[in-house]
Image (cartoon, rainbow, N blue to C red):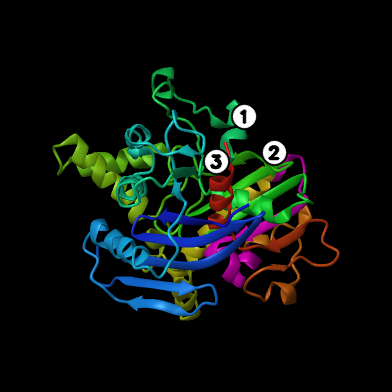
Amino acid sequence: MPSLPVLVLNSGSSSIKFSGYEAVNGQRTKLFEGAVDGIGTDLGQFWIKDADGKKLVDQNPALPTRAVAFKLVADALHSGKFPMPVAIGHRMVCGGPTVQKNQLITPELIDEMERYTAFAPLHTPIAIYIMRESLHIFPGVPNFVCLDTYFHRTMPEVVTHMPIPDEYAAMGVRRYGYHGISYESIVHQLQPSVPGKLIVAHLGNGASITAIRNGQCLDTSMGLTPTGGLISGTRTGDIDPGVLLFILRKIAETTSDATAAADKLEVVASKKAGLLGVSGLSNDMRELREAIQAGNAKARLAVDKFTWTIAKWIGSFVAELGGLDMLVFTGGIGENDIASRAEICSGLGALGIVLDPARNNVRGPAIISAKDSPVTVRVIPPAEDLMIVNHVIRLLGE
């Protein structure tokens, strides 16, 4: 089999991450990785590292728009310093009810996914833009969409169906679930011995948790949009709908246009809530931990709300799975915040979850449960780009 350079494009609400892999004979070798962060600000960062971690590009450009940001990436990839890809994989948070499989990207497919921007409004617009640009700047190179929702396609209807009138369900309103590529990568890394009853907590600025039975998704915390489920950096997580109606009515007192009022509510629920909203300080767990050390009560409340909510979801998923073999922490907070892991697990001894404080005192991959813990607790970093490459190679062969 010839060497196949594959480019991965992974866009966020204010960032574009990318990486290059060489795929040959079942082996996947990372060639480079990079990112443009801080889109929409004057405090942008643009960096590229080679396979050994050496910085090839390290800049602090102004990034007023996504167009400016992606041009930096495109120019670098066409500089001759990196192999031209034979295929490109794009992470897409949600393709809507009509696009639920990873597949070849066409202009028509992009138009169809764009219809459902409201399902992931912070992520879809930039992903759609990058897909269109990629088809233009890499003519003749096949581009594939890899969906965060794809892993969650095995959830039963009792989980996915919302308690709403059928007219809205017919519009595609249902539980989709997100962070699916991350969850899929954890299952991949646990091969060939995937536990039958597994819970994975993806904890970062966006946070979710998933129950996995025999390697397949049974249930997940995020719903129609990434705003649902766990409290996270700036998102409410699950909340009494009456609270949103109350806030909407307050907004409507000074906003006559219905769409503008809904947009303002979206900002409150997705960008001003969560850890930031409760603490009034920050959505960064590191800053909140420092504030707690300084005696900040609101920071303490925000973090307690975060860890308490996760523990509650773990308990509900144990009931749904009928037991638990393994709990995995992943994502930036899951991998690096020792205190959060300890606080989440501190009251779960009755479920068989017992941490070893010494083992837990680590950042990065590890087994952190006590030797006599009935449930194994692990920290495993996600490998999203690798999973996207695997999907691209599979789709190239179809």
Q: Residues within 10 Å of mark 1 (few under 14, many from 20)?
A: few
- The residues bearing labels 2 and 3 have C-alpha atoms spaced at a distance of 34 Å
User: Dot 2 lies on which element?
Assistant: helix
- Which residue is pictured at 22% across the width and 44% down the height? 251
Residue type at mark 3 is Leu
- Which residue is pictured at 73% across the width and 74% down the height? 359
Residue tagged by mark 2? 320
- Which residue is pictured at 40% across the width and 37% down the height? 241
Left or right of 294 on screen, residue 353: right
Residue tagged by mark 3? 395
Magenta region, main secondary structure: helix
Give the percent coordinates (x, y) of residue 66. 27, 57
Q: Is residue 376 above or below residue 252?
A: below
User: Furthest-front residue in view?
Assistant: 2
Which residues are the magenta region?
A: 318-343
User: Furthest-top residue in view?
Assistant: 166
